[in-house]
Structure formats: C-alpha cells, structure tokens
Amino acid sequence: MTRIRRLTDSCVVVETDRHSTLIDPGFHPFDHFDLEEVGDVDRVLITHEHADHVDPRFVRWLIDRRNDLTVFSNRRVAERLAREGIEVSGEPPDGVSFEEALHEPIPTGDQPPNLSLTVEGAFTHPGDSHRPTVTAPVLALPLLAPWTSTTAAVAFARRLRPRQVIPIHDFLLGPDGRDFIVGMAKRILARDGIELVPLGWGEGYTL
C-alpha cells in the first residue's frame, strides 16, 4: 500500500508500510498548512536548495518532533543546512534512488544542482527539472514556474510516460487559474494514456 499526500506546492508525503517520506519541506507550510497534519514522518528528501523546496525552519520542526529523522539531499543543500546545525546525508536511503538532473535555467541565470527522487519504486519527484530520464508509475509534474511552462511540463510527462501524474509547483496560480491549467493538462495527457490526478493542497490518495 502506498499513499501519496500533497501537503502544499511541491511538498509531498509518500507513505508505505515501511516508511513515511516527506519530500521538499519548503516555506509554504508555514503560511498555508496546519503542520500538525504532516504525520509521523521518519525521513526527509530534498531536491535542491531553493527556499520553496527547503526551509530550515520546517526541517528543524520535523527533527524536533522525531530525533531519529534523517535528511537526505545533495552537497549544496547540505552546506546550507549545516549553517543551521542540521546534518544531511548524500547517500540515498533504503528504497530510494537519486538521479542527478540539473535545475532548469531561471531568469536570474542560476541553475543549481537538483535531484530527481524515486521512492519505493512508486513515485518520482523531479524537483525543478525536466531532465530526468526515468520515472516511477506516478510522477510529480511541475505545472507552472518562472523556469517552465505548462507546454514544457506536458512534453516532459509525454517523454517519460508515467501511468499517472500529480500536479506540483502551481503556487503562482489562483484557484480559477489552477483549475484551468490542471484541466487542460489532464485532457491533453489523457490522449497519451496518462492520468492526471488533480490533488489540491492537503489532499491525497492511495495507489
């Protein structure tokens, strides 16, 4: 049994019989989500260093709730969190695989290292990249950001051909805009046999 819960923008929890894995604890939960609903997370994965994907306050809050929690990411994230006294492992944990996939260029010209993360062979979170070469049956799909467009997102999903996608990275959209973009992507991907599962913030489903 695998359950996927989308907490906020790109922050997702993957729950199995063995682990509860939280991916990308960015700043959004402090503004939009009741942290007590996170659940009993035992490990944290972080795709890259941008604040909407890692907020030291959120990571510290998770560690303070469970002192055996381990954080996993790349060197740049480790350097950032080391300044807050938080240790980060660069080795993927049990049941998780990492694929290095450079962040897409953003308007400032920055293009940091980024990890695409696959959890328990069921769910892949690409971070902020369209460069991953493999996916699990369920793919988190960034729909709109300064570094991407919905057109590019749909092309990325079509290339990897997961069975399902869930939307992430849509915080720039209001409710009407989100409904429009998600609905459009859902219709287009359905032509290729890819189901878009429209999870809103705080929603989840069981595979």
Image (tube, rainbow, N blue to C red):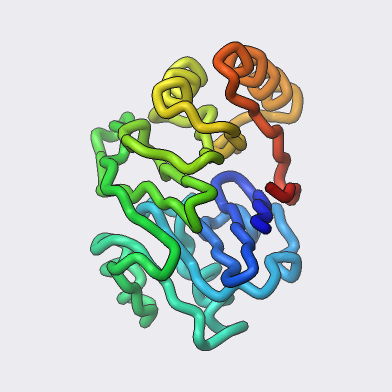
* Residue 149 appearing in the image: no
Is 170 on the left-hand or right-hand side of 48? right
34 over 136 or under it: above or below: below
Instruction: Give the residue at x 66% y 14%.
Output: 187
Instruction: Give the residue at x 37% y 47%.
Output: 116
* Residue 74 appearing in the image: yes
105 over 191 or under it: above or below: below
Residue 102 in picture, x, y percent from top left: 26, 41
Instruction: Give the residue at x 74% y 47%.
Output: 205
Is 32 on the left-hand or right-hand side of 82? right
Instruction: Give the residue at x 50% y 34%.
Output: 142
Residue 81 in picture, x, y percent from top left: 36, 71
- The residue closer to the viewer here, 81 or 136, is 136
Residue 176 in picture, x, y percent from top left: 75, 23
Q: The N terminus is located in which quarter?
A: bottom right
Residue 79 in picture, x, y percent from top left: 26, 68
63 over 124 or under it: above or below: below
160 over 189 or under it: above or below: below
The number of numbered badges drawn on the structure is 0
- The residue closer to the viewer here, 113 or 30, is 113
